[in-house]
Amino acid sequence: MKRPAIYVIGAGVAGLSCAVELSARGFAVEVVERAAALGEGACSWMAGGMLAPWCERATTDEAVARLGVPSIDWWRRHFPGTVCKGSLVVAPARDAADLTRFAQRTERFDWIDGDRLGDLEPDLAGRFRRSLFFPDEAHLDPRKALAGLAATLAARGVPIRFGTTDAGTATRSKAEASTVVDCRGLAARDRLADLRGVRGEMMVVRIRELSLSRPVRLLHPRIPLYIVPRGEGLFMIGATMIESEERRGVSLRSAVDLMNAAYTLHPAFGEAEIVELGSDLRPAFPDNLPQLRHVDGVLHANGLFRHGFLLAPWLAGEVAASLETKDEDLPERRRA
């Protein structure tokens, strides 16, 4: 028998992951989304899609790596397009000390020389003397992954209602005796006062003369930059982190930083076609870690910051576990 109905608000990576996990555990689920189509207005659409817990460990709280490691297997089970070829970290010769410091803050990597780098990525042969190779990491195309989760839900008979003008009000009125899981991201600030937006900007370019098999992070004196292959000559270059909630187009400075990163990795990027420039606001709590909260009878799953695809499976598991146990003593906040 189906368990009680669960209404998930939001069809970004958090909402869809929660719906997939809940439906797998026997709950009757419905997803409501205010946008007219999948990905429209969702910061998940702008994500890099790197499943890189050990790389993230070098620059974030250890919880990000600890909670993110199982996500690689979760995505492999739920999205066949997950690519498990590891990731690379490189630095120009002038920033070699930054590469050493990066290595000291993390684990599960191999130091490799230029020859080994050329074996892994022939188009980078001779470009860097030393690099870090994280063989257990993975990546995916976020837009295809969201579509894959939506297809999984459709196959399970889980509806996604798009174009709901006021998902919160509509769902609460429909689900007086049911559970509402709010995965609206930054829109949930009407209930989560300490949620803030962190601006991120990205670029997609096309160049068919260059090939990469895995994400490459380029250590940068100001911001971490990465280049993720999307197939068919497409590469996503990201991403800035700006403590600003201003919604506008990509700034000239950010565009220059992103382009310089690509050019530093390989000069061939200088001839790449710019396909897309995009920006959005990532939802984050003060500690930049996701949380589960009960507010006014609604279960909020939020605060993925820039780790949406890496930590969404953990967040979905926490939501499902809390609803399975029906724990009346669940604290008001469940932190990462």
Image (cartoon, rainbow, N blue to C red):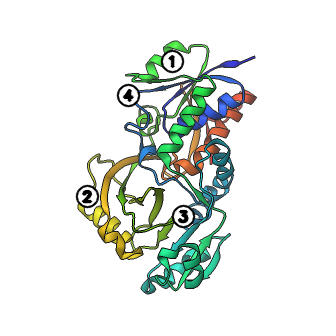
Q: Residue 285: where, in percent of width, then height?
A: 49, 47
- The image shows residue 107 at horizontal and vertical percentages of 66, 70
Report the number of discs: 4
Q: Which mark is residue 172?
A: 1
For the point 44% across and 38% down, which residue is it?
193
Residue that sits furthest to the left in the current view: 252
The three-letter amino acid code for the residue at tag 3 is Arg
For the N terminus, give its image quadrant.
top right
Callout in the foreground (3, 4): 3
Under circle 3, the secondary element is loop
Of mark 1 and mark 3, the one earlier in the sequence is 1
**Quarter of the image where one finds residue 14:** top right
- Give the residue drawn at x 35%, y 76%: 267
Q: Looking at this view, is 318 or 212 the one in front? A: 212
Q: Residue at x 60, y 35 (%)?
A: 18
> Which of the marked residues, 3 or 2, is nearer the chain's N terminus?
3
The x, y position of residue 116, in whole percent, is 60, 80
Asked whether 287 or 279 is in front, the reply is: 279
Graded by Cα atoms within 10 Å as few (under 14), some (14 to 19) or many (20 or more), the crowding at tag 3 reads: many
Is there CB contact under 8 Å for labels 3 and 2?
A: no
Query: Pointer 1: residues within 10 angstroms few (<14), some, or many (20+)?
Result: some
Question: Sequence-wise, which precedes: disc 3 or disc 4?
Answer: 4
> Disc 3 vs disc 2: which is toward the camera?
3
Look at mark 3 in the image and give the residue it sits on. Answer: 214
Counting residues from the start of the chain, the first of labels 2 and 1 encountered is: 1
> Is label 4 in a helix, a strand or a loop?
loop
The numbered disc on residue 36 is 4
